[in-house]
C-alpha cells in the first residue's frame, strides 16, 4: 500500500501566492532593514553622543579638580602648616583667603595638626552662610580655630575677615568635641604623599554637593584640605542633554545620586542639620528623585553598552559610563533618552515606505496568474514521473522537451535520480551476495561510475608493508592508470573520506585506517569540480571502504581462526616427536581427495559437491580431527615398550636380576666357606646366572611388543615372576602424596623388613582407579549426552608388571588403548562447546568420526555407514593412510606404500573403511603424489592396484 501525497494548492495559485508573498516579504524586509539600519545608526549616534557627553563632563570635572589639586600641593609647603600657635597661624590666613578668591569653586580650606588643632577658612558669599555663622557686617571670610584646652575640652573661636583679609572681629564658640585626627580625610592623607580626593557628599552649610581634597604637609605632620562644590558640573550636564526628555545623573556604587539636573531643588526641600563640617547631609537615591529610567539603566549593570528598557510607560535607551575624574571612588554617569524622541523622524519615513510597497505589489498579480498556468503544465508532467518514483519504479522514461531550460533540467535530474537509485540498489545487492573481494570491487566500481556518471575509474588496495597501492578493479580508459604505485599514507593530512580535486578519494575504515584509493575519470564539466559532487562521490566511495573493511575483517578473522587451529595442531604434533606432522599431513591428503571427488562429473560421485562454506568446514574438521590429543598423556602416546610409564621400568626389573645375580655369587662363596667343593659351587652359581641372563633376555624381548605373545610365553612370564628377592628398604618412603594415599589404601599395614617380594608382580598399588576422572562414554551413563558408546576399562591405569608384560600384541594395555582412543571423545566434547555458526555446525562431528567404521564397530559412538556422510569417510581414509605410511612412529616400523594400501584393502574387506571410496582413492593415484612428497624412497615400492581392488571387494 502506497502513501497518498497530501493535497495542496494548484501551481497557478501557488505561483500568484509566491509572487505576492515574495513582494510583500521583500517590501517587509526592505522596510524592516531600513528601519533596523536607521535605528541602529541613530542608536550608534546616541551612543557616541552619550560617550562624548560623558567625556565632556569628565574633562570639566578634571578642570575643576586639577587646579585645586595643584594649589593644594603649593599650600602644603606654606609655613602655616608648621605654625604651632594660633597667632602664627592667623598671620598666614591671607594666603588661604587669596586661594579662595582665586578659585571660586573652593568652598573652604582647612588645616589639621597632629596635636588635634584645627583651622578652617571659608568664604561667606551667601546670606544663608552669613546668617548661619552670625557674621558681623563687612565680614567676607570666616576663620574657625579649634585648640585642645585640657581635661578633654576644646577652645573654639570664630574669626571674621573682610574682603581685604583684615580681621574685623572674633567670638568664642561652645560646641561638641571635634578631633580632626579621627576623620577619614586626615587618616587617608597621612598615609600617602599624594593628594587624596574624597567621595562626593552634601555640604551641611551650603547644601551643595562637593568633594574634599586633602594632602599631607611637606615639612610637618599637619594635613591641609579643601572642599570643592560641583554646581558647575550640574550646569554642564543640563546643557548637554541630547533631547528635551534626556535625563543625566552621576551616581556612586551604592546608587546614591551625586549630580542630577534638578538636584538642588531636591536638596533645598530637605532639612539636614549638621553641628559641624563633617556632619554631611544624606545623598538622595534614584528612587527618591523619581528617575525610573535612570534606575533601570543602573540596575542593568551593563557598562558602556546601550540598553533598551521600559519606564514611566514608554521605551528608553539607557547608557552607563564609568566616571573617574573625581578621585578613586567608583562612579557612573547614567544617561536615559526617550526612544520616541530619538526615532520620531524614522517613524515618519517608515510609513512612506509601506505605502510605496503596497502600490508595487498590485501589477504582479496578473503576471503571476499567467506565468503559473504556463509552468504548471510542464510541472504536472514532471509530477507524474516523480509519482512513478514514489511507487518504487525507477525505470528511466523518455522526457518531452520543453522551451524552459529549468524544465529540461528537472527531466534530466529525474532520469539521473532513477539511474543513481538503480545503481545504489545494485550496489546493495552486490555487497550482500558477492564474496570475492576482487569481483565485488569490479562490480561496485561499475555501479559507482554509473551513479556518478563518470567516464571511468579504478579501485586500488593499500599494502601497508610495501607502502604501495595495487589496482584491483578498473573501468574505462586504463592507459593512465598504473598497476602499482607508491603512496604515502599520511593519516593526519588525509583524514577519512577527504576528497581530492583530481578525482582521488582515499578509502578509509571506520577507525581512520587507510584501505585503498578510488580514482574517478571525471568529464570535462565544472559541475564535477564542485564541493557537492565531491561530497557525493565521497559518500559513494565509502561503500567501497565498507566493503573492503568488511571483507578484510572477515578474511582476517578467518585467517586468525585458521592460525589458531594450526597452532593447536602444531602443539599436538610437538607433544610427541614420533607423530610430528600428522596433524598437517592428514588435512592435506583429505582436502586433496575431497576436491577430487567434488570435481567428478560422472560416476557414483557426480552429485557430490562442496561449496566454499562446506569446503571450509571440511578444512576445519581435517585440521581439528586430533585436537583432543592435547590432553592425551605423552608417556602413553609415546609408549614404545610394555613397561614404560614416565620411564621404562625394565631397568627396575633388570636391577632385581642384578640382585639375584649377587645373591648367586654370595651363595657360592658361602657354600665354599661351609666346606662345599669350590668347583661344584662355581658350577651351580654359573648355572643360576646363566638362567638369570636367559630369563631377563626373555622379559626384555616381551617388553618390546613387536611380536605376538603366545600362551607358553605368558606361562613362562608367570614362572619367572614367581621367583623372590629380598627387599631391605622401606618402599613407602619418598613417594608423592597421591602415591602415599594409594599405597595406604592398597596396603594399610606396614610390611616388616626385610621382606621377600616376587621378581615380577601385580600389586594392589599398581591399580589407579578412575575416581573423579571417569569419562561419560558408556552407553548407559546418564551424563553421556553425545551418544558415546565405548567400553570403559575397570580402572584409569593398571601399572602391574605382569599385566603389562602379558600384553599379547603391541605395547598398549586395555587402559592405555582407551587413554589414546579417548582423544576422539575429547575432540567432540571440546568442539561441541564452541559457538559454531550454522554453516559450520557439522565440524565437530566430521572431526570426531574419523575412527568410526562402516560396520558400526568403531568409536566413539559406533555409528554405522548410514550415519557417516562422505566427508567423514574421506577423513577416515586420509587418517588411516597417513598413520600406516608414517615413518616416525616408535611402536612400529615404517610400512611400504603397497603394504599400507593392502592393509587398507583388508580393512575394507572387514567392513572398517568405505570400499567404494577406497577404490576411488586407489584409482585416482592421489596416494602417489602424497608418497613422493612425504614418504621415504625405500617405502615407495610398486603397487598392484588391480590386486588391491580385488582384495578390497572380496568377502571376509
Image (cartoon, rainbow, N blue to C red):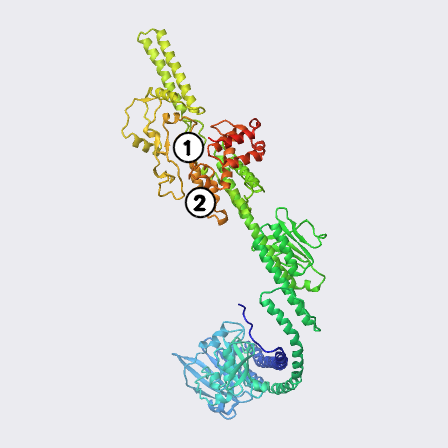
Q: Does residue 157 appear to the left or right of 660 in the view shown?
A: right
Residue 776 image-quadrant placement: top left
Circle 1 residue: 817
- Estimate the x, y position of residue 235 in percent, counting from the top left: 57, 87
- Estimate the x, y position of residue 92 in percent, counting from the top left: 53, 81
* Residue closest to the eye, 668 or 190: 668
Is residue 618 shown above or below 29?
above
- Estimate the x, y position of residue 257 in percent, counting from the top left: 50, 82
Label 2 secondary element: helix
Q: Are marks 1 and 2 in contact (CB under 8 Å)?
A: no
Question: Is residue 199 something one can see in this rendering?
Answer: no
Considering only order in the chain, which callout, 2 or 1, is on the residue closer to the N terminus? 1
Label 1 secondary element: helix
In the image, which disc is placed on residue 832? 2
Is residue 497 shown above or below 556?
below
Query: What residue appears at the point 52 percent right and 92 percent down from the top-left corner?
Result: 138
Residue 559 image-quadrant placement: top right
Q: Does residue 798 appear to the left or right of 95 in the view shown?
A: left
Is residue 835 shown above or below 927?
below
* Residue closest to the eye, 885 or 566: 885
Amino acid at each position: 500500500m502506497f502513501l497518498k501525497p497530501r493535497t495542496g494548492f494548484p501551481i497557478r495559485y501557488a505561483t500568484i501566492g509566491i509572487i505576492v508573498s515574495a513582494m510583500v516579504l521583500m517590501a517587509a524586509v526592505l522596510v524592516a532593514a531600513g528601519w533596523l539600519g536607521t535605528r541602529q545608526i541613530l542608536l550608534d549616534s546616541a551612543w557616541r553622543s552619550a560617550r562624548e557627553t560623558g567625556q565632556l563632563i569628565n574633562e570639566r570635572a578634571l578642570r575643576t579638580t586639577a587646579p585645586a589639586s595643584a594649589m593644594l600641593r603649593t599650600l602644603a609647603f606654606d609655613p602655616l602648616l608648621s605654625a604651632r600657635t594660633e597667632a602664627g597661624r592667623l598671620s598666614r590666613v591671607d594666603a588661604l583667603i587669596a586661594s579662595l578668591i582665586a578659585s571660586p569653586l573652593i568652598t573652604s580650606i582647612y588645616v589639621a595638626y597632629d596635636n588635634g588643632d584645627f583651622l578652617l577658612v571659608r568664604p561667606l558669599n551667601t546670606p544663608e552662610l552669613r546668617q548661619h555663622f552670625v557674621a558681623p557686617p563687612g565680614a567676607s571670610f570666616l576663620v574657625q580655630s579649634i585648640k585642645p584646652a585640657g581635661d578633654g575640652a576644646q577652645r573654639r573661636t570664630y574669626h571674621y575677615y573682610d574682603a581685604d583679609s583684615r580681621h574685623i572681629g572674633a567670638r568664642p564658640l561652645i560646641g561638641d568635641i571635634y578631633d580632626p585626627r579621627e576623620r577619614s580625610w586626615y587618616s587617608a592623607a597621612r598615609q600617602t604623599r599624594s593628594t587624596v580626593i574624597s567621595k562626593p557628599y552634601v555640604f551641611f552649610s551650603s547644601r551643595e554637593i562637593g568633594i574634599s581634597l586633602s594632602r599631607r604637609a611637606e615639612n610637618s605632620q599637619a594635613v591641609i584640605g579643601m572642599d570643592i562644590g560641583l554646581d558647575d558640573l550640574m550646569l554642564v550636564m543640563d546643557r548637554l542633554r541630547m533631547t528635551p526628555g534626556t535625563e543625566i545623573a552621576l551616581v556612586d556604587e551604592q546608587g546614591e545620586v551625586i549630580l542630577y539636573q534638578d538636584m538642588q531643588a531636591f536638596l533645598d526641600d530637605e532639612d539636614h542639620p549638621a553641628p559641624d563640617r563633617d556632619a554631611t547631609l544624606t545623598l538622595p537615591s534614584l528612587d527618591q528623585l523619581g528617575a525610573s529610567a535612570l534606575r533601570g539603566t543602573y540596575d542593568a549593570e551593563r557598562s558602556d553598552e546601550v540598553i533598551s528598557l521600559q519606564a514611566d510607560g514608554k521605551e528608553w535607551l539607557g547608557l552607563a559610563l564609568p566616571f573617574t575624574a573625581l578621585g578613586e571612588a567608583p562612579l557612573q554617569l547614567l544617561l536615559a533618552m526617550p526612544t520616541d524622541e530619538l526615532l520620531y523622524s524614522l517613524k515618519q519615513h517608515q510609513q512612506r515606505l509601506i505605502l510605496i510597497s503596497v502600490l508595487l505589489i498590485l501589477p504582479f498579480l496578473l503576471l503571476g496568474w499567467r506565468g503559473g498556468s504556463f509552468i504548471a503544465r510542464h510541472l504536472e508532467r514532471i509530477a507524474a514521473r516523480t509519482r512513478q518514483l514514489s511507487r518504487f519504479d525507477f525505470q528511466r522514461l523518455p522526457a518531452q522537451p520543453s522551451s524552459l531550460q529549468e524544465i529540461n533540467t528537472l527531466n534530466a535530474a529525474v532520469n539521473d535520480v532513477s539511474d543513481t537509485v538503480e545503481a545504489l540498489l545494485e550496489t546493495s545487492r552486490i555487497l550482500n551476495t558477492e564474496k570475492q573481494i576482487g569481483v565485488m570491487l569490479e562490480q561496485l566500481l561499475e555501479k559507482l561510475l554509473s551513479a556518478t556518471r563518470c567516464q571511468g575509474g579504478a579501485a586500488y588496495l593499500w599494502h601497508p608493508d610495501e607502502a604501495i597501492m595495487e589496482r584491483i578493479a578498473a573501468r574505462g580508459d586504463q592507459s593512465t592508470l598504473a598497476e602499482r604505485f607508491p603512496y604515502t599514507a599520511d593519516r593526519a593530512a588525509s583524514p577519512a573520506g577527504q576528497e581530492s580535486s583530481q578525482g582521488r578519494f582515499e578509502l578509509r575504515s571506520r577507525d581512520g585506517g587507510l584501505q585503498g584509493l578510488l580514482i574517478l575519470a571525471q568529464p570535462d564539466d565544472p559541475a564535477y569540480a564542485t564541493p557537492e559532487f565531491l561530497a557525493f562521490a565521497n559518500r559513494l566511495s565509502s561503500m567501497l571502504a565498507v566493503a573492503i573493511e568488511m571483507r578484510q575483517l572477515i578474511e582476517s578473522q578467518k585467517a586468525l581462526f585458521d592460525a589458531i587451529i594450526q597452532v593447536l595442531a602444531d602443539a599436538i604434533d610437538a607433544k610427541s616427536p614420533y607423530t610430528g606432522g600428522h596433524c598437517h599431513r592428514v588435512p592435506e591428503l583429505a582436502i586433496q581427495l575431497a576436491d577430487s571427488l567434488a570435481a567428478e562429473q560422472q560416476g557414483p560421485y557426480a552429485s557430490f559437491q562442496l561449496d566454499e562454506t562446506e569446503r571450509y568446514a571440511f578444512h576445519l574438521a581435517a585440521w581439528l580431527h586430533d585436537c583432543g590429543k592435547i590432553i592425551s598423556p605423552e608417556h602413553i602416546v609415546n609408549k614404545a615398550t610394555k613397561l614404560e610409564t614416565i620411564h621404562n621400568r625394565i631397568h627396575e626389573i633388570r636391577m632385581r636380576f642384578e640382585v639375584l645375580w649377587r645373591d648367586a655369587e654370595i651363595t657360592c662363596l658361602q657354600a665354599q666357606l661351609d666346606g662345599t667343593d669350590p668347583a661344584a659351587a662355581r658350577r651351580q652359581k654359573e648355572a643360576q646366572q646363566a638362567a638369570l641372563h636367559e630369563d631377563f633376555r626373555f622379559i626384555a624381548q616381551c617388553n618390546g611388543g613387536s611380536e605376538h605373545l603366545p600362551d607358553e610365553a605368558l606361562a613362562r612370564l608367570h614362572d619367572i615372576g614367581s621367583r623372590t628377592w629380598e627387599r631391605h628398604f622401606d618402599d613407602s618412603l619418598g613417594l608423592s602424596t597421591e602415591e602415599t594415599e594409594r599405597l595406604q589404601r592398597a596396603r594399610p599395614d606396614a610390611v616388616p623388613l626385610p621382606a621377600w617380594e616376587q621378581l615380577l608382580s601385580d600389586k594392589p598399588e599398581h591399580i589407579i582407579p578412575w575416581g573423579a576422572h571417569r569419562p561419560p562414554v558408556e552407553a548407559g551413563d546418564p551424563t553421556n549426552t553425545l551418544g558415546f558408546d565405548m567400553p570403559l576399562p575397570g580402572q584409569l591405569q593398571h601399572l602391574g608388571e605382569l599385566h603389562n608384560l602379558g600384553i599379547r600384541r603391541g605395547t598398549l594395555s586395555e587402559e592405555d588403548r582407551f587413554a589414546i582412543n579417548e582423544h576422539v571423545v575429547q575432540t567432540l566434547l571440546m568442539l561441541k562447546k564452541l559457538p559454531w555458526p550454522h554453516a559450520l555446525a557439522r565440524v565437530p562431528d566430521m572431526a570426531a568420526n574419523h575412527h568410526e567404521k562402516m560396520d558400526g564397530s568403531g568409536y566413539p559412538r559406533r555409528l554405522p555407514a548410514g550415519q557417516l556422510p562422505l566427508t567423514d569417510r574421506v577423513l577416515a581414509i586420509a587418517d588411516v593412510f597417513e598413520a600406516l605410511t608414517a615413518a616416525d612412529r616408535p611402536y612400529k616400523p615404517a610400512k611400504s606404500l603397497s603394504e599400507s594400501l593392502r592393509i587398507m584393502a583388508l580393512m575394507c574387506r572387514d567392513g572398517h573403511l568405505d570400499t567404494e571410496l577406497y577404490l576411488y582413492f586407489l584409482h585416482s593415484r592421489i596416494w602417489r603424489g602424497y608418497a613422493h612428497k612425504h614418504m621415504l624412497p625405500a617405502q615407495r615400492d610398486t603397487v598392484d592396484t588391480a590386486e588391491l581392488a580385488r582384495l578390497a571387494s572380496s568377502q571376509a
